[in-house]
Amino acid sequence: MFSYQKFAESKPKLLITVILTTVGALSVPVLMPHIYHGAHIWHLLLHTSGIILSVFLAILSVNAYYKMRTKKMIITTIAFMVFTAAEIVQLLDATKTHVYNILESPSEIAHLMMLAMIGLLALAIFRRD
């Protein structure tokens, strides 16, 4: 019998499921048309990885809310959902332009820094002290 609680407790399984679901949902309509556009695909994958990590953190914060029932967890959940929505909007906007210089543009460096921020948050959750 499949139990959501058992599944949600296993963070690696949850992350793999989020990765497969997100990439599966975005690959045909968003990523595949731009696969041969040089560095453009790397820009789209940057946003896709931001979506993956923010969805993962949003799911974990929803699970934490149901365990602790605090208002802080609701605010955290909303913050991760807003970050997810922002990444989706940026991904859809990025499909309009086909020329990107990954490390030369200040906006690209800002994208990398936001991805690093959300990645460090995800790493902090996986870390066991």
Image (cartoon, rainbow, N blue to C red):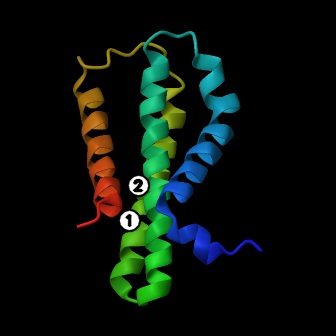
Identify residue for label 1. 79
Please tell me which residue lies in front, 41 or 89: 41
Q: Is residue 33 left or right of residue 62?
A: right
Check the picture and name the quadrant holding the C terminus.
bottom left
Q: Residue at x 57, y 51 (%)?
A: 18
At x 46%, y 86%, the residue is 67
Q: Few, some or many C-alpha atoms within 10 Å of disc 2 (few <14, some 14-19, many ≥20)?
A: many
| Residue reaching furthest to the right | 1
Question: Residue 69 location in percent, x, y?
Answer: 43, 90
On the image, the x and y values in percent for residue 24 come to: 67, 39
Which image quadrant is residue 83 in? bottom left
Q: Seen from this angle, which residue lies furthest bottom?
A: 69
Q: Is residue 114 visible?
A: yes
Could you say whether the residue bearing mark 1 is in a helix, strand or loop?
Answer: helix
Residue 81 appears in view? no
Q: Residues within 10 Å of mark 1 (few under 14, many from 20)?
A: some
Could you tell me if the residues under marks 1 and 2 are in contact, i.e. CB atoms within 8 Å?
yes
* Rendered view: 13 above or below 4: above
- Percent x, y for residue 72? 33, 81
As measured in the structure, the alpha-carbon distance from the residue carrying label 1 to the one carrying label 2 is 6 Å
Residue under the point 55% across and 69% down: 8
Q: Is residue 110 above or below residue 102?
A: below
Residue 23 location, quadrant: top right
- Residue on which disc 2 sits: 83
